[in-house]
Amino acid sequence: MVEKISLADSAARRETVTRFADVPGSLANFAAELAATKCAARETVLVMANPTPFATAAATSNSIEIFDRPPTASDLIALAAGDELSKPEYLFARKITGKDFIQLLGFAAADDKSWELKITELQNMDLQVSAKDLTELIGQFQDEPIVDLAIQIATAISNQTPVIIDGSRALLAASIVYEYSVAARSWLFVADLPKSAAGQQLFKHRNWISLAANQVAAGDGLAGIASLSLARTAALLLRH
């Protein structure tokens, strides 16, 4: 599927950057990305399983529909899947970033027994799995939700639908896709810096650039909603 992912139109991006050189903030930058992906941001949706009542209310107030999987009739998707990684997902994050589990879990609770136990469990799990590369790891955990999330992202962008990434789990899924297709990056927009230590390591690893729509992305859909609203304004800017 990733072989169908093509690069966005870099010439259109450069032209839009020049056109809106005097427009401050992230609005002009986002307009350039929409121009590159030929996204009109007219059919924008939030993809999120089990949204909170507040996220649902926030989406409704912004006229954004919520789906549990990406619909085919949308031209811009925000994907939120939470911020806390599962144990297998930490293995994926380690394989992609090369960071140890202490760095991925963060140092804030280094004196906490439960934190030490989790580190030990992850290290033991890593030894048991012993996958030499990402492809082997996917093969061993092909039924994990994170693999399905990566497939959802790959499917959307192979159909030239840009995806906004909200939170650490969505960023991990996007990073898996990126490992197999560098072109994927031109169709992926990171809403904000993830909240978790693992998400921040993933963010730094590939020098992702955030839209800074909500200051922090916790995978709860709020940064995604803010980014979709920003996208609509940026698309309006392009049309005028």
Image (tube, rainbow, N blue to C red):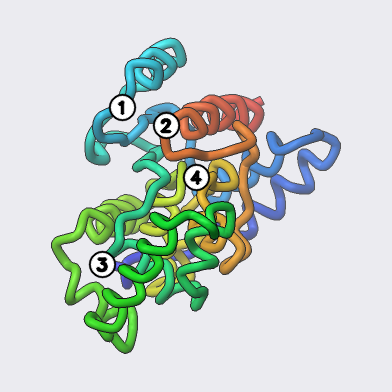
Which is nearer the eye, 113 or 210?
A: 113
Residue that badge 4 annotates: 38
Which is nearer the eye, 43 or 127?
A: 127
Q: Quadrant of residue 129?
A: bottom left
Callouts 2 and 1 close, C-beta under 8 Å? yes
| Percent coordinates x, y for residue 128 in the rendering | 23, 82
| Percent coordinates x, y for residue 201 in the rendering | 55, 62
Question: From the viewer's perspective, is 167 left or right of 36?
Answer: left
Which is nearer the eye, 151 or 8?
A: 151
| Percent coordinates x, y for residue 193 in the rendering | 59, 47
Residue that badge 1 annotates: 51
Which is nearer the eye, 85 or 222?
A: 85
How far apart marks 3 and 2 lie (CA) works out to 26 Å
How far apart marks 4 and 1 lie (CA) works out to 29 Å
The first of marks 3 and 2 along the sequence is 3
Please state which amino acid type lies under the numbered disc 4: Lys
Callouts 2 and 4 close, C-beta under 8 Å? no
Secondary structure, mark 3, is loop
Q: Quadrant of residue 151?
A: bottom left
* Disc 4: CA contacts within 10 A as few (<14), some (14-19) or many (>=20): some
Residue that badge 2 annotates: 221
Residue that badge 3 annotates: 1
* Disc 1: CA contacts within 10 A as few (<14), some (14-19) or many (>=20): many
The residue that appears at 24% across and 73% down in the rendered structure is 138
